[in-house]
Amino acid sequence: MKVERLRKIIEYSSKNSEEIYSMVKRFCAFAEIEYDSALLNILQIVRSSFQKKGYFVFEMPFDDDEIGALCYRGDGLGYVVINTSLPKVNVNFAIAHEIYHVFFGKSEFVSKVEFADDHYYEHEEEYAANLFAGMLLMPEVSFRRMYQKFKMESSGNEVETIIRLMSYYQVPYMAVLIRCLELELIAGNMASEQLLNVDRVQIRQRLADLWLDEK
């Protein structure tokens, strides 16, 4: 991801965090879960909530390594289709992203969650959905505490800290980096090329080195 795009995301988050946070709390109240606790199984929680809103969840593998989920509404019914061929971290974020569209989307839509950096954060409603997903899956109080813990265990290495957080919260690397920037745990001018240009192979190898879940 380019630095300019990352700055736009953080700027949007700064301006809209209070509004989106209120949506997170409203969803959690609807789902009868604590809004400030980490979710251990987002799909188990959300399946019944989607059904109450008239949406059915289908899990199936796509022959695509970028689309995490598809969401659309037909004749009176809605469908959320989850790409199970992707790693769990991507699936979890895709599910949380689609919660925003189902509960707070402003129009009848066909939505897809992509993980390609060139397309992922281009539209305002997608910015909102991604901010929502980050807040839901990485609640602030818990995230701040675990960031400090993992940074100490990583001897201050930010890349390793992010990878540990990624494994703990089961979310994508870039989502963790963005959450760190939103909460000013990492200063914006510290979002170096080293942090931005970590690829999947490097992440997988570091997860193995740390004896963490690679799925």
Image (cartoon, grey):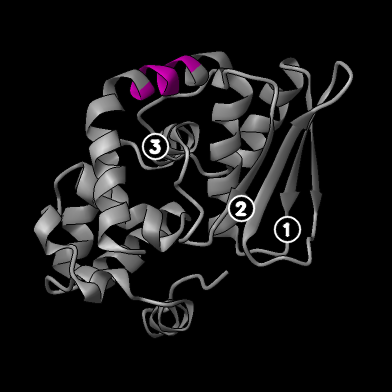
**Secondary element type, mark 2:** helix
The location of residue 22, given as percent across then percent down, is: 37, 17
Q: Is residue 79 shown above or below 190?
A: above
Please tell me whether residue 25 belongs to the stretch shown in magenta. yes
Residue 74: which numbered mark, if any?
A: none
Residue at coordinates 76% horizontally, 22% vertically from top-left? Answer: 51
- Left or right: 186, with 43 as reference point: left
Residue 131's mark? 3
First in sequence: mark 2 vs mark 1? 1
Disc 1 secondary structure class:
loop
What separation in Å lies between label 3 and label 2 (alpha carbons)?
16 Å
Please rate how many residues cluster around mark 1, counting C-alpha atoms within 10 Å: few if below 14, some from 14 to 19, many from 20: some
- Horizontal placement of 114 versus 129: left or right? right
Q: Position of residue 125 (x, y in %)?
A: 49, 31
Provide the residue span drawn in magenta.
20-26
Residue drawn 54% across the image and 19% down it: 104
Q: Is residue 16 above or below residue 63?
A: above
Q: Amino acid at mark 3?
A: Leu
